[in-house]
Image (cartoon, grey):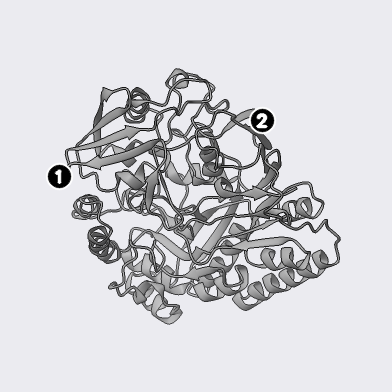
């Protein structure tokens, strides 16, 4: 099947879906800001099964929607990605980059009643650094050496590397605090104990997770509804049918699904621009022919990103080869990435011939069993076939696909990077030899030094300049991550939902959500 026919089939499918939903009747309610329902139940259609409810041991960004309602972070970020207080009311990086002082919020507690204090900070960071099963040690081990408790509410992080990224880094997994009393629980991955707004009341792992809002939660203005359920609905049609029937409240939608929802009378929220979340293909440089820079560059040039964005995402995924979108401080405005971002199959064939692969080669990509990933994979498969590369697709569960790639068992992975509160999270995972997105350990002699330079200051302008240098090095190296496009997020919901906000760094807008009666 040709590249053109694959895209045509996707477009035809979208049209049929839109017409079918347009004929379906649903309860079209209207949001009323004067009649808010704080006893409401929100049912969210989630597309991926979480790998773990232990924030320090999970393996995918797909865990984050559930984790963020269970576990408050030491810091948070606003919709533009700027650091703001959360469990820490304030912080200070000393001039020598030797310590980072946290002043913790008074009165915050874990769901088991224990206080969120400086000792809890120490217990959690100690665990991240020493637990053999920690999947996030690499995110902080080059920055934090130890933690001292100065008093009940003051913790000092003793630094072994620059700490300028900590205000945003601690807004992600490394800042998610587990009750110290639960850190040794063998079932923490299924029975979480955090300082977030919600307690889990029941679950059918892999199917449904039910939560109730804690009456003693410190921020009365956050999560202005009482119950929350995450339904795991892998199939797109199931999620849309659930919304139509009024069985769920909201779900994320992509591309044609957005028009499908609108045609059926559902409400659709769309972000104002691209986020750090991106569709991508990850290559294991220790397998197949991916150790050759020319091969990686040829694959980039063979992919028609504009067509993928237009047909599969209805334009709501901004094409590009850089890991950060335009408008985000870590994006490089000076880098000439045209040799990677352009669609130029002729040049791609030349590069393969120069690498001694004029007849192409074969590899197998692990692909999560979600429709958008499979659609991406099929189009990329045909793009690569046009330059002689045979990409074979192996569909499997999303967590399994991720695990196979991280452990080095897969040639490649088609998937989605969910975004991160700090751009260094991506660098440490994709460009450093210890990163989970870099099983082939591709790096350069200067990469660790350039990464450290991005965290020498909390000043955004200084960090931007450092990322310009780092990305120049990454593209000179030839990245093993093929970025397809950056997501413009959309959520479809019942009509009585309001104040859903989007974050440039990814994530859900449940914290600001309102439900009317």
Tell me the SS state at disc 2.
strand
Q: Position of residue 402 (x, y in %)?
A: 50, 45
Q: Residue furthest front?
A: 34
- Vertical order, 494 against 39 (above or below): below
In the foreground, 372 or 29: 29
**Image quadrant in which the N terminus is located:** bottom right
Tell me the SS state at disc 1.
loop
Q: Residue at x 21, y 45 (%)?
A: 162
Q: Residue furthest left?
A: 96
In the foreground, 179 or 130: 179
Determine whether label 1 and label 2 are within 8 Å by CB: no
Say whether residue 112 is visible: yes
Q: Residue at x 63, y 51 (%)?
A: 369
How far apart marks 1 and 2 lie (CA) works out to 47 Å
Q: Which residue is mark 2?
A: 203
Say whether residue 1 is visible: no
Q: Position of residue 113 (x, y in %)?
A: 50, 20
In the foreground, 478 or 253: 253
Q: Which residue is mark 1?
A: 95
């Amino acid at each position: 099947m040709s590249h053109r026919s694959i895209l045509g089939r996707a477009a035809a499918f979208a049209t049929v879906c839109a017409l079918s939903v347009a004929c379906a009747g649903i309860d079209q309610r209207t949001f009323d800001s004067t009649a808010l329902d704080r006893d409401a139940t929100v049912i969210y259609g989630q597309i991926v099964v979480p790998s773990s409810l232990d924030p320090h041991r999970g393996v995918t960004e797909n865990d984050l929607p559930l984790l963020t309602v269970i576990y408050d972070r030491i810091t948070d970020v606003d919709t533009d990605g700027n650091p703001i207080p959360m469990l820490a009311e304030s912080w200070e990086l000393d001039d020598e980059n030797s310590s980072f002082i946290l002043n913790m919020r008074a009165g915050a507690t874990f769901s088991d009643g224990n206080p969120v204090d400086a000792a809890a900070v120490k217990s959690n960071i100690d665990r991240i650094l020493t637990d053999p099963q920690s999947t996030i040690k690499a995110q902080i081990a080059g920055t934090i050496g130890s933690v001292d408790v100065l008093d009940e509410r003051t913790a000092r992080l003793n630094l072994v590397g620059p700490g300028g990224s900590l205000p945003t880094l601690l807004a992600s997994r490394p800042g998610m605090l587990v009750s110290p009393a639960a850190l040794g629980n063998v079932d923490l991955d299924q029975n979480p104990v955090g300082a977030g707004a919600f307690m889990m009341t029941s679950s059918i792992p892999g199917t449904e997770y039910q939560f109730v809002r804690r009456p003693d939660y410190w921020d009365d203005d956050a999560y202005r509804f009482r119950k929350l359920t995450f339904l795991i609905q892998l199939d797109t049609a199931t999620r849309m049918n659930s919304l139509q029937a009024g069985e769920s409240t909201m779900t994320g939608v992509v591309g044609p699904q957005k028009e499908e929802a609108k045609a059926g009378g559902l409400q659709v929220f769309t972000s104002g621009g691209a986020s750090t979340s991106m569709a991508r293909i990850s290559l294991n440089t220790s397998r197949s022919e991916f150790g050759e820079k020319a091969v990686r560059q040829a694959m980039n040039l063979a992919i028609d990103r504009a067509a993928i964005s237009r047909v599969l995402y209805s334009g709501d995924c901004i094409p590009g080869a850089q890991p950060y979108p335009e408008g985000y401080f870590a994006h490089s405005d000076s880098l000439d990435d045209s040799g990677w971002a352009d669609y130029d199959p002729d040049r791609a064939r030349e590069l393969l011939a120069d690498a001694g692969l004029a007849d192409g080669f074969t590899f197998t990509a692990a692909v999560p069993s979600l429709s958008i990933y499979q659609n991406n994979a099929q189009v990329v498969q045909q793009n690569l076939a046009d330059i002689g590369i045979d990409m074979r697709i192996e569909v499997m569960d999303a967590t399994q696909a991720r695990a196979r790639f991280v452990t080095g068992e897969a040639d490649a992975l088609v998937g989605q990077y969910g975004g991160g509160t700090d751009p260094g999270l991506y660098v440490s995972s994709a460009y450093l030899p210890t990163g989970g997105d870099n099983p082939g350990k591709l790096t350069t002699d200067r990469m660790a030094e350039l990464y450290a330079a991005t965290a020498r200051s909390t000043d955004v302008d200084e960090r931007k300049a450092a990322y310009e240098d780092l990305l120049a090095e990454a593209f000179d190296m030839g990245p093993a991550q093929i970025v397809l496009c950056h997501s413009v997020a959309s959520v479809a919901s019942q009509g009585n939902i309001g104040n859903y906000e989007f974050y440039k760094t990814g994530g859900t807008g449940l914290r600001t959500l309102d439900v009317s009666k």
